[in-house]
Image (cartoon, rainbow, N blue to C red):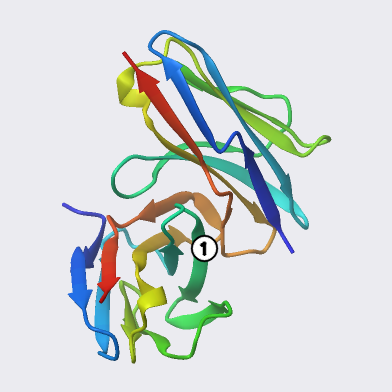
Amino acid sequence: DTAVSQTPKYLVTQMGNDKSIKCEQNLGHDTMYWYKQDSKKFLKIMFSYNNKELIINETVPNRFSPKSPDKAHLNLHINSLELGDSAVYFCASSQGLYLSGYTFGSGTRLTVV
Amino acid sequence: EDKVVQSPLSLVVHEGDTVTLNCSYEVTNFRSLLWYKQEKKAPTFLFMLTSSGIEKKSGRLSSILDKKELFSILNITATQTGDSAVYLCANSGAGSYQLTFGKGTKLSVIP
């Protein structure tokens, strides 16, 4: 039983394409996140949703659009992909402010060619 | 802006050595500091520290927080090759829904 699952695990696509990454958690958590990890392993917050509402929207290009249809899902859609978007994208979840329960998905490695 | 700085950025040791990884931070209204271990995939949770001077221990790993000096250390004794990973430090401020991560320390343990 995977707690936070992301699909796909790997994504190779050409510049200019539009792609989506899906995330689902079965932990009953009310807060979900998208983090981007670059080639130097630096994890940086992109978005956070609490009870389906956007609460953190860091400075990312507006080509990135998160969508949370319900508390258990947070998807990430990326338009007009660029080479610099290549990274590993991690979904995570937590129960509100109790961040010790911060659980990561296994990541989606996006490669833009 | 909240900031987390880890040192060293990378470290190579032999099996059996003891290592100390450092994490200093700046955060508004500190609430917690967390350590994660990242091997090939997702970061896995190691410790959460909220109180100064209280050591958290799990097997050969231990961590302590100094809230006055704004730093934490992660100790690993009798290192094994399976300890090779990137160790991430992160903190959160009161009322914050996010963790701010440091850049990590890449530990390589050689036989």
Residue B12 visible in the displayed image:
yes
Q: Is residue B68 left or right of residue A26?
A: right
Residue B59 visible (yes or no):
no
Residue at the spot 52% in from the left edge and 81% down from the top edge: A60
Front residue of A10/A77: it is A10
Task: Say above or below: B17 vs B2.
Answer: above
Q: Amino acid at mark 1?
A: Lys
On the image, which quarter does residue B23 sit in?
A: top right
* Mark 1 surroundings within 10 Å by alpha-carbon count, few (fewer than 14), some (14 through 19), many (20 or more): many
The image shows residue A83, relative to residue B30, as above or below, that is below
Q: Quadrant of the C terminus of chain A?
A: bottom left
Residue at horizontal 35 percent and vertical 18 percent from the top = B110
Q: How many marks?
A: 1
- Location of mark 1 (residue): A44
From the viewer's side, name the closer residue of A60 and A50. Answer: A60
**Is label 1 in a helix, a strand or a loop?**
strand
**Residue displayed at 67% across by 33% down:** B72
**Callout 1: chain:** A
Q: Position of residue A108 (x, y in %)?
A: 27, 64
Q: Position of residue B29 (x, y in %)?
A: 77, 55
Image location (x, y in percent) of residue B60: 44, 15
Task: Identify which residue is drawn at 28% across, 69% down.
Answer: A110
